[in-house]
Amino acid sequence: MTAFRRRYGASPLHLLLVLASFALAAYAGVRMLTGDTLGVALWFVGVALLHDLVLLPLYAVTDRAAQHLFREIPEQGQPRASVNYVRVPLFVSGVLLLVWWPLILGRVDHYTAYTGLPADGFLERWLLITAALCLVSAAILVVHRWHESAPRRQAARRERRAREAVR
């Protein structure tokens, strides 16, 4: 097993899982391409181009702007982790928008006919979920900052008590 791990770089279970995921992806690809092969291929090329030429530069510039807003702590020279409190809720909100965009933007007329469910309210729900994610993230940031500043508050309290004791 040590020789296998040395040659492969991971355990045999890892190799088995990787091969199983490739097999599943190949099966899904074969099943998907049995219908409109040209349409599926064009869709994949279009999505890859849209991602690489539009979305990637867009969220890279957005991330750089967020990093600029939350730049380094001057006394420590380390980047702040605060930018992650913006990244995570916006990422989750973006994934939700990506998955549900036809319903959020009201672009699906046949949704009610197929599901029997109303197609309205998705925009409001998505906005509420986004607001809730941002509020929870902000609350976690406040708690994190409060705990981070606890040693400074305790030191200031001790210093105040020492000055009062001297008087």
Image: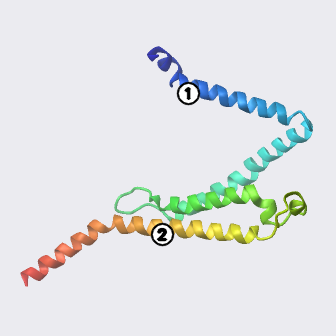
- For residue 15, what is the image quadrant? top right
Position of residue 161 measured from the top left corner of the image (x, y, whole percent): 15, 78
Label ID, residue 14: 1
Identify the residue at the far front of this view: 116
Whether 77 is drawn above or below 19: the answer is below
Q: Nearer the viewer, residue 41 or 109?
A: 109
Position of residue 155 measured from the top left corner of the image (x, y, whole percent): 22, 70
Identify the residue at the far top of this view: 3
Position of residue 103 measured from the top left corner of the image (x, y, whole percent): 80, 63
Q: Nearer the viewer, residue 16 or 54?
A: 16
Crowd class of label 1 (few under 14; some 14 to 19; many from 20; radius 10 Å) = few
- For residue 87, what is the image quadrant? bottom right
Question: Is 80 placed left or right of 20 in the picture?
Answer: left
Crowd class of label 2 (few under 14; some 14 to 19; many from 20; radius 10 Å) = few
Which residue is under mark 2? 139
Residue at the (58%, 65%) spot, across then down: 133
| Element class at badge 1 | helix
**Quadrant (top left/top right/bottom left/bottom right) for the C terminus:** bottom left
Pick whichever of labels 2 and 1 is earlier in the sequence.
1
Residue at the (90%, 41%) spot, across then down: 39
Mark pair 2, 1: CA separation: 38 Å
| Element class at badge 2 | helix
Position of residue 99 measured from the top left corner of the image (x, y, whole percent): 74, 55
Whether 6 is drawn above or below 18: the answer is above
Question: Is 98 placed left or right of 77 in the picture?
Answer: right
Colouring scheme applied when the structure was drawn: rainbow
Identify the residue at the far left of this view: 166
Question: Is 143 placed left or right of 156 in the picture?
Answer: right
